[in-house]
């Protein structure tokens, strides 16, 4: 069993990997993509403990010394760019306090009309006939919402799409600076300006831009994949709740982001050395947005985007339908700790 292998399976085909991981025990040792062992937690209560344990940290600098950051999919360490996903403890609390007010349920609900308008306009712009919504729509829609909320000019959308795709392909050295430069074009009337005001006084400009980059990329990469499953369920399985069904069955990230032990410790009686990589099986446990101090701050926005899209499809495109049977759709994943997405989503909107 290789938990990090590339996958291709039908949309309705069971995810046997999570079943096999749980059968193997609450803590499973596997071969990490960058070499050496990784410990994968498959028990829910144990997972919540791990996700809250201050001895199990996010800083990529704590990864095994022989890991290739590109192969492992590691972001820059906290010493280069402190961020919500690379720091823990008081520093993380401080950063989270600055970010969280921007994306509360109340703030996002106030934007529902605008988000629906974006979804409606983008769907209306699709050509007649059958279109593959995985080609452009599922990446451009969440990015349009994000740029609009942040106050970044929408003429930066194409460049943002290109940079996000390059980053998914592993081009950190080119894509991260490009997205940081785009973040620097934000005006004074959006959430980007508000975040600047909430960050600690004296925060360097490059660090501010890295925080904005994090919001842009994190808000795109997982939502992009999830939207395909939401649309498929909205059009092909209309009896359920397409958002809940999609998020439960096809969690955008199969595993938590990498965590590392800061000292030797035990997890459920299993001894781990210092700098041991640890993952949580989010798919198998249904922890779509994580748990603990690093619970996804964009959860409300992601769900609002999905629900706005379902509303617009059903209200403004009542004739929309899948161009292939629901159970013939195929999901693919490149492996590593990345999630799966639909290979294609052919839809007739009119």
Image: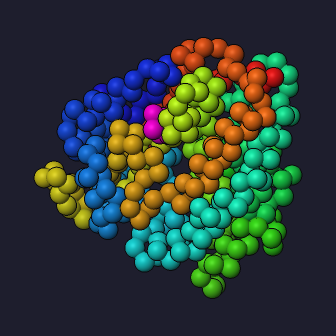
Task: Name the image quarter holding residue 322.
Answer: top right
In the picture, measured across the screen, residue 342 lies left or right of residue 290, that is: right
- Counting from the top left corner in percent of width and height, residue 315 is at 75, 35
Q: Is 146 contained in the magenta span? A: no
| Horizontal arrangement in the rendering, residue 23 relative to residue 175 (left or right) | left
Q: Residue at x 13, y 52 (%)?
A: 269
Q: Is residue 9 left or right of residue 183?
A: left
Residue 133 location in percent, x, y? 71, 29
Q: Nearer the viewer, residue 304 or 281?
A: 304
Quadrant in the rendering for residue 309 = top right
Colour style of the rendered protein structure: rainbow
Magenta segment range?
246-251
Q: Is residue 63 visible?
A: no
Magenta stretch, overall SS: helix
Tell me where residue 168 sits by quadrant: top right
Query: In the rendered view of the protein, which quadrant contains the C terminus?
Result: top right
Q: How many marks?
A: 0
Q: Give yes or no for residue 250 being in the magenta stretch.
A: yes
Residue 22 in view of the camera: yes
Given residues 219 and 101, the one toward you in this image is 101
Quadrant location of the N terminus in the rendered image: top left
Q: Is residue 238 above or below residue 247?
A: above
**Residue at 74%, 50% in the rendered image:** 115
Residue 29, placed above or below residue 14 = below
User: Does residue 290 sit above or below 17 in this rendering?
Assistant: below
Residue found at the very far left of the displayed protein: 269
Q: Residue at x 78, y 53 (%)?
A: 114
Tell me where residue 153 appears, x and y as whole percent: 84, 58
Residue at left 73%, top 62%? 150
- Front one among 21 and 33: 21
């Amino acid at each position: 069993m290789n938990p990090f292998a590339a996958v291709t399976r039908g949309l309705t085909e069971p995810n046997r990997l999570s079943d096999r991981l749980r059968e193997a025990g609450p803590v499973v040792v596997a071969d990490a993509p960058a070499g050496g062992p990784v410990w994968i937690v498959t028990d829910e209560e144990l997972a919540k403990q791990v996700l809250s344990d201050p001895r199990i940290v996010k800083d990529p600098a704590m990864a095994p010394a022989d890991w290739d950051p590109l192969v492992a999919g590691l972001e820059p360490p906290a010493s280069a760019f402190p961020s919500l996903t690379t720091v823990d403890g008081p520093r993380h609390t401080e950063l989270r306090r600055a970010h969280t007010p921007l994306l509360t349920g109340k703030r996002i609900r106030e934007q529902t009309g605008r988000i629906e308008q974006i979804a409606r306009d983008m769907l209306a712009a699709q050509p007649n006939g059958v279109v593959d919504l995985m080609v452009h729509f599922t990446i451009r829609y969440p990015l349009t919402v994000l740029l609009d909320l942040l106050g970044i000019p929408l003429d930066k959308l194409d460049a943002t799409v290109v940079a996000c795709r390059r980053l998914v392909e592993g081009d950190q050295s080119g894509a991260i600076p490009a997205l940081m430069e785009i973040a620097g074009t934000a005006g004074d009337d959006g959430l980007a300006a508000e975040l600047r005001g909430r960050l600690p006084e004296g925060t360097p400009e490059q660090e501010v831009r890295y925080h904005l980059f994090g919001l842009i990329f994190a808000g795109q990469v997982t939502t992009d994949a999830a939207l395909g499953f939401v649309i498929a369920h909205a059009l092909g399985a209309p009896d359920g709740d397409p958002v809940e069904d999609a998020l439960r069955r096809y969690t955008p990230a199969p595993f938590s982001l990498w965590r590392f032990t800061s000292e030797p410790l035990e997890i459920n009686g299993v001894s781990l050395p210092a700098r041991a990589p640890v993952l949580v099986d989010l798919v198998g446990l249904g922890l779509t947005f994580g748990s603990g101090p690093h619970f996804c701050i964009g959860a409300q926005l992601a769900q609002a985007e999905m629900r706005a899209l379902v509303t617009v499809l059903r209200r403004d495109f009542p004739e929309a339908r899948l161009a292939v049977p629901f159970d013939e759709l195929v999901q693919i994943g490149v492996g590593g700790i990345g999630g799966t997405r639909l290979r294609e989503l052919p839809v007739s909107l009119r």
